[in-house]
Structure formats: structure tokens, C-alpha cells
Amino acid sequence: GAVVSQHPSWVICKSGTSVKIECRSLDFQATTMFWYRQFPKQSLMLMATSNEGSKATYEQGVEKDKFLINHASLTLSTLTVTSAHPEDSSFYICSAETEDTQYFGPGTRLTVL
Amino acid sequence: DQQVKQNSPSLSVQEGRISILNCDYTNSMFDYFLWYKKYPAEGPTFLISISSIKDKNEDGRFTVFLNKSAKHLSLHIVPSQPGDSAVYFCAAAFSGTYKYIFGTGTRLKVLA
């Protein structure tokens, strides 16, 4: 089946620094990738839709200047959390779209100290 | 307002028995539904899906049932195995968009 990877899988950073998370589709090209954030005891929250070669579409309430998304190629999308704060600590998951479904990456655990 | 609801946050089932996970949705325009399975610290993995033109889809031990009039779908796992212990998310979508609206998940625990 289709494989989506994320790097890093786990990151700890200091408050005020920026963190970049990569999402790659390993064996297929994805024109669209999605970024989710998971809250404890809650479902995945869609943050933004990333389209190759164009600006990302952000969901209501998601700060686009704080969560920078770049989709430079058909196999790579990046999420940069700028000036991270402890409240940004979470599990970030990407997914990549194929013809019939989405495949999720393994997630990145971000801890901001 | 939660458009996709999984009202049971947790469920425990004996190994070998049937697990039934339920999901309700509010928007009758949804026409594609999916179930995902998620282990701790991992991303959710696709399990099974169903289009609104069907009322049942089966894949091995997993069967999804869709009741459009009740806006309800369920996932049946038979027989349940300890390795099925995970959080199960249902999701609804408008076909062709693949922008999924997820439920809040049900934690299934299969007891050996």
C-alpha cells in the first residue's frame, strides 16, 4: 500500500524557536496533502490543505503566519511551526491524497518547552 | 458543532467475540465514509470505506454497515483479536473532495 513518511517523528524545542516537519509520499505522487493536529481525547483537526505549487488553504482559526506550509513537489510538503510556544505541543499528522483515499503519515510529536 | 459523532469513547470486548463500533453524522450530503485505526503515537491507518450507494462493505474480519436514513454507520469486527485494540475513527466526506470530517474516536480494547 501507499506509504507516507514524516520527519522527524519526535522533536523537542525551546519556546520561540521554529520547527519544520516534513511529509513525504514515498511511492506515489500526491498533488494534495493535508495537515492535521491531534488533541488529547479528541479527533484529528484539519489545519490546512496543501496543494503542490500553490498556496495552502488554511482552516478557520489556524494562523497561516504561524503554521507555514510549503508543498514544493509532488512528494513533499512541509509544515513549519514558527515561534513555537508550549501550547503548540501536540501530535501533527499529515496525509497524502490518492485517487481513492488518503494515506496518513505516522505523525510527529512536538514538545515545546 | 460536531458533524461526525462517535458517542462511545471506549469499548471492551472479549477475544473472539464481535466488536461493534458506531458512528453518527448530521449532514445527509456526506456520501463517502471511512474507518481508520490508530495505535498510540502513530498516525491513523485506513481500514475500510463505504460509498453511500451501498449499505454494506466487507473486508475480511471487518464489515461496515451504512444506514443512510438514520445517518448511522457501524464497523463490525468478527472475531475480535487482541491486536485490534486501538482507537477507531470514523470519517465522513463528500466524494471527490477527500476532505474528511473525523469523529472523536472510540478506544477498543480486546481482552484475551
Image: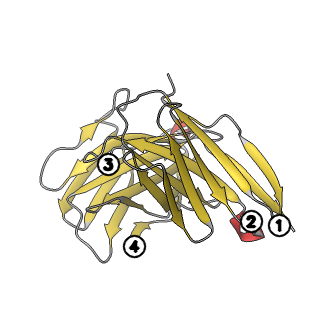
Of A111 and B23, the residue lying toward us = B23
Say which residue appears at 55% left-offset and 49% top-offset.
Answer: B65
Chain of the residue where label 2 is placed in the rendered structure = B
The local secondary structure at tag 3 comes to loop
Q: Position of residue A56 (x, y in %)?
A: 22, 44
Specify the amino acid type for callout 4.
Val
Specify the amino acid type for callout 2.
Ser
Residue at the top extreme of this rendering: B1
Mark nearer the N terminus (3 vs 1)? 1
**Residue at which label 2 appears:** B80
The local secondary structure at tag 4 comes to loop
- Asked if labels 1 and 2 touch by Cβ distance under 8 angstroms, the answer is yes
The local secondary structure at tag 1 comes to loop
Task: Bin the neighbour count of mark 2 within 10 Å (Cα to Cα): few under 14, some 14-19, many 20 and up.
Answer: many
Gap in angstroms between the C-alphas marked 4 and 2: 26 Å
Q: Which mark is residue A3?
A: 4
Query: Is residue B44 found left or right of B41 in the rendered image?
Result: left
Q: Position of residue B40 (x, y in %)?
A: 65, 59
